[in-house]
Structure formats: C-alpha cells, structure tokens
Amino acid sequence: MKKTILITGASSGFGLMLANDLHKKGFEVIGTSREPEKYQGKTPFKLLRLDIDDDNSIKSFTGQLFSQIKQLDVLVNNAGYMVTGLAEETKIEDGRKQFETNFWGTVKITNALLPYFRKQRQGQIITVSSIVGLIGPPNLSFYSASKHAVEGFFKSLRFELNQFNIKVSVVEPVWFKTNLGHNAVSSTGNITDYDLYRKQVNALTQKGLDEAESPDAVVKTISKLIDMKEPKFSNPVGKMSGMIVFLQAFAPKMFESSILKSVKTILK
C-alpha cells in the first residue's frame, strides 16, 4: 500500500522538488502553500492552503486534510524562511517572527497531527533543519537560533513518540540553490562599529549562496529516510557537512579559526 506524505511549504524550493520526486515514485503526495491558488494546475500533486503561523489556518487545514485521506504516513516539515543580519543590528521583532514560523509554526503543525499519528500507532516525522542548527555562523544569529530550537524540540519528541512507533528525524542541509537566500529578510545595519565587518559577512553569505550545490542531495536524503525502517535522527547533507560537524565537535578552535579567517579574507 503506497504511503501518503504531507509536505509543508511545497510550492517552491526543497518542498516542491521533493513533492514532485515522491509523486513520480508513486506516493500519494499532499503539499501545502499559503496561496495554493497561485499554483493551481501547475503541480501534479494536491496543494492545500496552510499558514503555519495562523492557528485558525492549522485547524481548518487538518479538518480538510483528514476529510480527503484515511491515513497519514509521513509528515515533512519544510516550511520556513531565513532572517540574515548581525545579532545586535537585527530588530527583535524580526527575530520573534523568525521563531514564530521556523520554530513555533513547525511545532504547532506537528502537534496538530500527532493525535492522528498516535491513533494509527505509526508514522514518520521528518523536519528540514539546517547545518546552522548545529553551528552558529556570523550573520545568521536568529535563523541559527530558530534551527537550534527545532533540533532540541525534535530530539526530545523522538523519545516520547517511540512508544507509538512514530519515527522522528531532522535533515541539516548546508547551502543549496533554492529561493531561501533570495527570499531572506535582511536587517538594515546602522551601528558604525560594524561597518567593515557587515560588508565582510554579507559578502561571505553571498559567496555561500553563489557557490551552493544543487538541492538534489537533500531530496535524495529525505527519500532514503522515508524508505528506512529505523531512520537516524540527525542527517547532515552536502559537501563539507560531515567535516563541519566533526570539527565543531572535536576541533572547535580550528573550526572557529577557519570561520574568522574566512570573514577577514573575503574582501581581499
């Protein structure tokens, strides 16, 4: 029996690529978008309205979803966005909005679906985190913090849902060519002490986006997790991801030195 898979944020980026790939493989795929009417007739899979920041939208969505399907096998939490900027220069309100979507929105849609998973006594939850959920690079303080929060929440949830045969994993991509960077919300810097540093880290962030890999590796990783009986919790994806995690854990001074050097030399 083919699995039914729900993917949030499936109108672009990782979500769209994954939804198309899984649909081609024969899964029943349901995607979500805040404005599904914009994509009507453009996707081969169902696209339902969902705003994970809106409690009423979540309630309406879950009712609509389970009026159309009998069982949900996999939830892929993919919806989210990125705030860039130096920590001191980023408005707290922008930081709050970052958490409202990336953390609280992800938590709320997960919690809304957990009663159905528990009733089934089976299921799988895969959440798209980020490599910055494991490290803390400059210029991404609030985005990194939101992804650290996601990591911590799902680490605990994994233990709690084990008794119900519900598997929990996160995927931690490095930079990939999606619209995440292009749609990022950037802070406006105005502290003169940071003028040179701001130019350096902005250039470093842009370099990362310009040299990003194709998203295929993320799609393949999530597809493999769906096929596994015992999926791992943490799944870094992309070139150098393994090295980044290793250095952070076992050679932190070397890792920090490499980041500091990259910032200082980027504009030379």
Image (cartoon, helix red, strand yellow):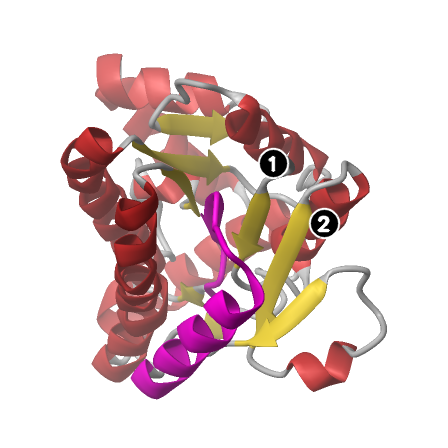
Dots 1, 2 in contact, CB < 8 A: yes
Q: Amino acid at mark 2?
A: Met
Q: Quadrant of residue 93?
A: bottom left
The region drawn magenta spans 55-81
How many numbered discs? 2
The amino acid sitting under disc 1 is Val
Q: Disc 1 designates what residue? A: 218
**Image point (68%, 63%), residue name:** 12
Determine if the magenta segment contains residue 61: yes
Quarter of the image for the C terminus: give it.
top right
Mark 1 and mark 2: Cα distance apart in space? 9 Å
Q: Spot the residue most to the right.
A: 41
- Image position, residue 30 (x, y; %): 62, 59
The residue identified by callout 2 is: 17
Give the crowd class for mark 2: few <14, some 14-19, many >=20 residues within 10 Å. Answer: some
Q: Is any part of residue 43 visible from this angle?
A: yes
Whether 192 is drawn above or below 75: the answer is below
Where in the figure is residue 172, as x and y percent of width and height? 44, 37
Q: Does 55 appear above or below 254?
A: below
Give percent across and percent down for residue 24: 81, 42
The residue under the point 56% across, 48% down is 5
In the image as oriented, which residue stretches furthest toward the top?
Answer: 250
